[in-house]
Amino acid sequence: MRLTRKATAMALASCMVLSMTACGGSQTAATTAAPATEAATTAAATEAAKEAETTAAAAAEATGTADMSDKKVGISIYKFDDNFMTLYRTELERYLTEDLGFKKENITIQDGKGDQAEQTNQIQNFIASGVDVMILNLVQASSAPQVTDMCKDANIPVVYINREPDVAEEERWASEKINATYVGADARQSGTFQGEEIAETANKGDINGDGKVSYIMVQGDPENVDAQYRTEFSVKALTDAGIEVEELLMQRGDWDQAKGQQIVQDALTQFGDKVEVVFCNNDAMALGALQAIEAAERKVNEDIYLVGVDALTEAVQNVVDGKMTGTVFNDHFSQADTAADIAVKFLSGETVDPVNMVDYVKVTSDNAADILAKVK
Ligand code: GAL
């Protein structure tokens, strides 16, 4: 389904290499010549291999695809134990190898384990081992200036993903012509979509008709702009629509399902029927929230609303089944593919914009079945 023009070109190029060196046939000197000595055979084979390499490079050139087969990529993910970043990581590796022609053995993916010191160590090791480009999902976005300088000094381009460094840092890349960039999605948009999903319900989120929407906010890791913006903009979409709001509780759940469940369980015990809306900064926490909601015998879309972000398969299925009010598709396919395409641009010496954003998509009962087909 995702076989692109580039993938076809790469398949063609590697088939050429194979046919020149191993498949034999009339086109290669190595197989047609009848060498008198072993040395001559080796020489002919070396010659053929060289010619094959040149042909692969030429094929790549002709189709506008750079030959990435010998390029080394260092990737570090803030932590492997994160549902959304696991989907992202899987697509990144698939796209690099299947569509862009990187070799699997040239791609190293490290688990940052939620520890910036550990991740910085991994980055130092990438530099020591001579990777050609890095794709980094920082544990702490605030460490971007230090990491960028390390990469710059080693002359290695860096593509930051998912956790956005601050604007001053992004501007520095442009003004100092540093080969660094960010690929992500504007979290303000996802927050706005969450708020709109509530504002678009029949009673505009005011289930008990007291003239205001009483909500609890389950936050991701607040160091992360995704958590900050989703929290701010989900509520702003309601107030912008002229809806009065009341915050019953805001608590950090660090993107984690078990924490989401605990927070919502406690909130439902404390506030009971007062809770009309549960905003979760991501779907993992919304899945936890749903467990707590069901355990408290509350019914989503009847006596409580629940929204998340990411469009994890299970969450989208819940939207289809009416167990979640909505979610927002955090398009890991487009983000991963864009990050990889930009890594290739750096390796090809092209100029890259400092910030590259992919759109979010609102997911409600209207389109959940279509989105499910996409993410499944
Ligand atoms: C967000 C995503 C969360 C979590 C976080 C990690 O964009 O919605 O589920 O993966 O990134 O930084």
Image: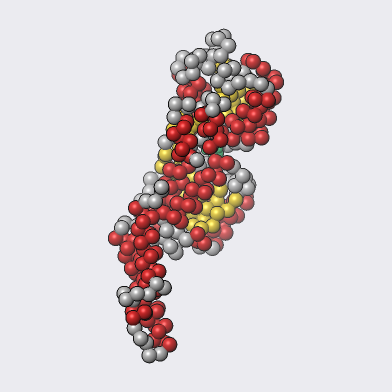
Residue at the extreme left of the image, as rendered:
62
Residue beneath the point at 66% across and 27% down: 292
Tell me residue 370's x, y (percent).
44, 34
Q: Nearer the viewer, residue 174 or 101?
A: 101
In the image: residue 344, left or right of residue 85: left
Query: Is residue 142 shown to the viewer in this render?
Result: no
- 106 to 316, vertically: above or below: below
Q: Does the rendering let one see residue 304?
A: yes
Where residue 236 sits in the image (x, y, percent)? 49, 22
Q: Position of residue 310 (x, y in %)?
A: 51, 35
Q: Would you place residue 231 above or below residue 107 in this image?
A: above
Work out whether residue 44 or residue 213 is closer to the camera in this orientation and state it.
44
Count numbered badges in the picture: 0
Q: Say left or right for 61 vs 172.
A: left
Q: Nearer the viewer, residue 16 or 207?
A: 16
Q: Is residue 369 above or below residue 216?
A: below
Q: Residue furthest top?
A: 210
Q: Residue at x 46, y 56 (%)?
A: 97
Ligand 1 sits in which quadrant?
top right
User: Up-down: is 353 above or below 292?
Assistant: below
Question: Image quadrant of residue 41?
Answer: bottom left
> In the visual, does 222 lie left or right of 351?
right
